[in-house]
Image (cartoon, coloured by chain):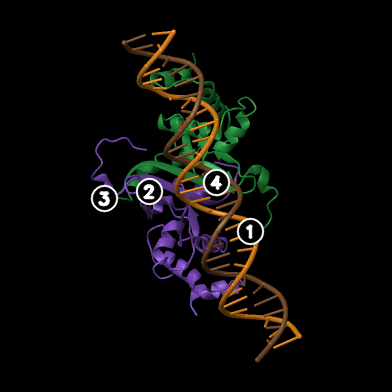
Chain colours: A purple, B green, C orange, D brown
Amino acid sequence: MDDISSILKEKGLKVTPQRLAIINMLKNTKEHPSAETIYKTLSSDFPTMSLATVYKTLEMLKSIGLVQELNVGEGSFRYDANVNSHPHLICYGCNRVDDLYDSALDDLLGRVSKYTDYLLMDQKLYFYGYCPDCKKKVTNHDHP
Amino acid sequence: MDDISSILKEKGLKVTPQRLAIINMLKNTKEHPSAETIYKTLSSDFPTMSLATVYKTLEMLKSIGLVQELNVGEGSFRYDANVNSHPHLICYGCNRVDDLYDSALDDLLGRVSKYTDYLLMDQKLYFYGYCPDCKKKVTNHDHP
DNA sequence: ACATTTCAAAAAATGATTGACAGCATAAAA
DNA sequence: TTTTATGCTGTCAATCATTTTTTGAAATGT
């Protein structure tokens, strides 16, 4: 009985191979895959699993706080099993999404709270540019 | 001849009533409307204009740097005629989107650059919580 | 004036996501 | 053990946001 199975059971949710496969894939990747990417990646092991199941499972995992949904500006969402609200880096060249670890952003929410009457609870920080691989190729193109 | 008309003409783009209406609406609102909202708002004055025209105009305005696109985490984009990359506040209660002016975030891009090998060019910062109106009503609900 | 080009607007298509429903598997109740 | 209930999966259609293609009107050249 691993961690995820017991969390699902506690919530009265069924533990199915598809569900375990999706969350395990998310836990074990540093990419930030879309539903479509998750579906394609798992389709070799689960050839009968449908895309709708992926969407429904992601919705369920989001609602119980096991994954977070990212909107980096594409036409679709990406998903991350690391649910603390850390900043992300998005490459204009290859569209990869990386995590950013930066203590300069610690307690940003607390600092920003002083400037607004909102009751702040969460943040999403996206930084855009060129990743180490792609910036070599960049000369003086226009940037999006 | 106002400002926007001359900008469009300089770029070799035609000045049409629809285009002027869309950008003027964006300039004169503090909301951050979606394409759909823009369409509905203007449809009383322009009953024949289609939603596709709104999208094409927004795409054009984005490409010449007159508006920016926001992805606050919904399934659709919102648009802002204020094109400097300032942070936004999103209310969990009423879904409004406000601008945030906070000097604590000045040169965040420069500071973050030291922590990554990315060549950074832009940022999008979103803070989530309850606006002054909605926070009165909040007790101990779950938060999204 | 006529032909040609341009380009905005409308119509149609696409891609992402969700909803409805039937069948299946598991678990609870009898 | 049988019955019953619950809820998950997969199929397929629907919906929503957005993009592409087509159409038509105005602008430009001859």
Q: Are marks 1 and 3 on the same chain?
A: no
User: Marks 3 and 4: which is nearer the front?
Assistant: 3
Which of the pair A124/D5 is nearer the observer?
D5
Q: Are marks 1 and 2 on the same chain?
A: no
User: Neighbour class for label 4 at 10 Å: few (<14), some, many (≥20)?
Assistant: some
Q: Which residue has dot 1 on it?
A: B142
User: Marks 4 and 1: which is nearer the front?
Assistant: 1
User: Residue B103, can we see it?
Assistant: yes
Q: Which residue has dot 4 on it?
A: A113
User: Neighbour class for label 3 at 10 Å: few (<14), some, many (≥20)?
Assistant: few
In this picture, residue B135 sits left or right of residue B36 = right
* Dot 3 or dot 4, earlier in sequence: 4
Q: Which residue has dot 2 on it?
A: A90
**Residue type beneath disc 3:** Asp
Q: Quadrant of residue A137?
A: top left
Q: Which mark is residue A133?
A: 3
